[in-house]
Image: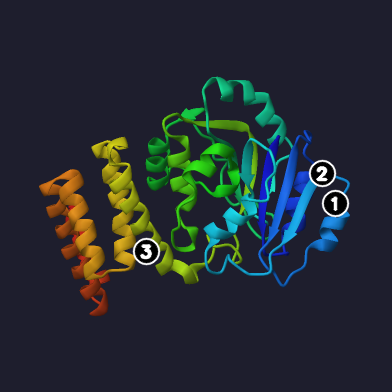
Amino acid sequence: MIAIVIPYYKLEFFEKTLESLKRQIDKRFKVYIGNDSSPENPVFLLEKYKNDFSFKYHYFDQNLGGISLVKQWERCLNLVENEEWIMILGDDDVLNENVVASFYRNLEDINKNEINVVRFATKVINEKEETISQKYKHPVLESGQDFLTRKFSKRTRSSLSEYVFKRNKIENIKFKELPLAWHSDDLAVLEFSIPNFIYSINEAQVLVRVSNLSITGDSSSKNQKNWATFEFCEILFKDHNLLFTKFQKKIILKKLEVAFLNIPSFKTYQKITSYYFEQIGFWSAINFQLLLIKYRMILILQKLKIFNGIYAIYAKLLNK
């Protein structure tokens, strides 16, 4: 069976999550809910759904998510009994009714291809249950490195809830600790899928919620997210360098450029410059320096409040 692990903290959308589990047309799953010492008690809701699906609920006395989301995931994963496959579902995300059924419908093909990571199509929803994105589908078989470069090129999206992982991969490789667990899921998808592919099921979808309550929607943690991007890319270049082509490395570094411009410092400048020299080559490193000069000039012109005027003149000259 599938274990659906829910690291619980916020009550606001939790009933939507539970309702989606109730509506699964295939009930071959068990839910494990780990309460991260939340002040919002969900027991009354669980009582409401106690006859709709099998679940195990545990209250943890100490809050870990505020210190380390990865450690909270780990202790919730320790609740799992004997299931071979594990989904970590957000306490505000929603499964379409055919998610579990479609997993079992594809299981023979999944096993034949020796797959360790399965993902579903997704849509993004907001706090009003409104769909705010297209439906994101994926190649049926895709390498972890191809997925990451697609995501960094903004041709797809990803979050933890839409994945199902082979249990032995989680136990042997483990989720890596990054600030706010930002990119910890991306890294897990890459590392758990090696040396095979990610298997995509596009006929079923997970609705991933983005709101002010979610980390994705929280703009106040921007700096931590950017530092996490640096740490993530450092692991990619240090531990998985041979997996990526030069073209893919350029895409990763473009992502890193954005993080650098958000948290500019001599330390981050040194790192990204050295990556350009080591991973791509001399001229790419020079181009990065020219980009920085251009960026600084724009900032100066904006501070002097003459950027818009100069840009308008430049645009007119180009049109001629």
Residue 16 in view here: yes
Q: Secondary structure at mark 1?
A: loop
> Mark 2, residues whose alpha carbon is within 10 Å: few (<14), some, or many (≥20)?
some
> Closest to the observer: 28 or 119?
28
| Residue 33 coordinates in the image, percent (x, y) | 71, 54
Question: Which residue position is annotated with label 2?
Answer: 53
Amino acid type for the residue under numbered disc 3: Trp
Residue under the image location 69 percent in, 38 percent down: 82
| Residue 258 coordinates in the image, percent (x, y) | 32, 59
Please, which colouring scheme is shown? rainbow
Residue under the image location 57 percent in, 25 percent down: 110
Q: Is residue 258 left or right of residue 225?
A: left
Amino acid type for the residue under numbered disc 2: Phe
Residue 93 in view here: no
Q: Is residue 55 left or right of residue 236?
A: right
Q: CA distance from mark 1 to mark 3?
A: 40 Å
Residue 201, compared with residue 20, is above or below; it is above
Question: Which residue position is annotated with label 3?
Answer: 227
Mark closest to the chain's N terminus, 2 or 3: 2
Q: Considering the image in quadrants, where does the N terminus appear?
A: top right
Q: CA distance from mark 1 to mark 2?
A: 7 Å
| Residue 147 coordinates in the image, percent (x, y) | 43, 38
Q: CA distance from mark 2 to mark 3?
A: 40 Å
Question: Which residue position is annotated with label 1?
Answer: 49
Q: Secondary structure at mark 2?
A: loop
Quarter location, residue 280: top left
Residue 201, compared with residue 152, is above or below; it is above
